[in-house]
Image (cartoon, rainbow, N blue to C red):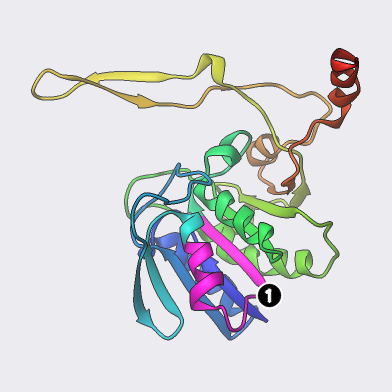
Amino acid sequence: MRILLTNDDGIEAPGLKALEAIAAQLSDDVWVVAPAEEQSGAGHSLTLTAPIRLRRYSDKRFAVRGTPTDSVMMAIGQVMQDHRPDLLLSGVNRGGNLAEDVTYSGTVSAAMEGCLAGIRSIALSQQMADYSAGKESFDAATATGADIVRRLIGIDWAPGVLMNINFPPIPAAQVKGVRVTEQGLRDYGHIAIDARTDPRGFPYYWFGYGREVDAPGHETDLKAMHEGFVSVTPLHLDMTHYATMAGLRGAFAG
């Protein structure tokens, strides 16, 4: 099995090293094509107004001066064009990609791009208890990731589906298991904006998360994190809301 690894945290990210450890348990034909620098929050953006630079570190390791989407496109269309990957793994992201995060996430978007190309694609993200540099722990991901990926590639997927895995911010020994979940919801109408002042007296701002929305009776990715489970959420590229189509046809009839 030929595996392509990418991410949005950059080719030097510790999460990519964790992903390489996971992939090494699955295959000895592992390629890395990742952004040269951090691209968190880049979403599914594509570089169209500047040239794409490709740097080769070794036979199977490349850095792209661009977004996660650029990296996947370069991997499939240039670096690996003679023998496309069988599986794309994106991550392991430093921080969870839960609820609406999937619409902003470069990690998930890289998996979307692989899915669009007809490659089985999985995004992996590690929720963090401590985001301080050097204190990030990918323990849950590295301990359980390979087994979860094996189970996923052992089943059939519908066309246009990618998998989004999130690992809880606890030691591997404390992980309670794996839950198949749906995408949760945060209320971004109540997003937290942290206003600060720099040393020269100018204001600047940090965006925070909106509050989580309770979903009684639903097994969401957010709930799984709180309860110490790995979440596996199937995402579909078809964003059409079919239940609304009948009403729309009526509105435009005649």
What residue is at 69 percent from the left and 47 percent from the top? 229
Q: Is residue 79 magenta?
A: yes
Q: Secondary structure at mark 1?
A: loop
Most extreme residue toward the front is 254
Q: Which residues are magenta?
A: 71-92
What residue is at 38 percent from the left and 56 percent from the top? 66
- Residue 83: x percent and y percent? 61, 83
What residue is at 50 percent from the left and 49 percent from the top? 106
Pick the quarter of the image with the N terminus: bottom right
In the image, taking residue 51 as reference, residue 80 lies left or right, namely: right
The answer to whether 238 is drawn above or below residue 115 in the figure is above
In the image, taking residue 75 as reference, residue 151 lies left or right, namely: right
The answer to whether 20 is drawn above or below residue 92 in the figure is below
Q: Quadrant of residue 4?
A: bottom right
Q: Is residue 118 magenta?
A: no
> Closer to the camera, 229 or 47?
47
The answer to whether 38 is drawn above or below residue 78 in the figure is above
Q: How many marks?
A: 1
- Residue 221: x percent and y percent? 69, 39
Pick the quarter of the image with the C terminus: top right
What residue is at 46 percent from the left and 82 percent from the top? 60
Q: Quadrant of residue 2?
A: bottom right
Q: Residues within 10 Å of mark 1 (few under 14, many from 20)?
A: few
Which residue lies under the disc numbered 1?
Answer: 86
Amino acid carrying label 1: it is Asp
- Residue 158: x percent and y percent? 84, 56
> Closer to the camera, 222 or 158?
158
- Residue 190: x percent and y percent? 52, 14
> Closer to the camera, 37 or 17?
37
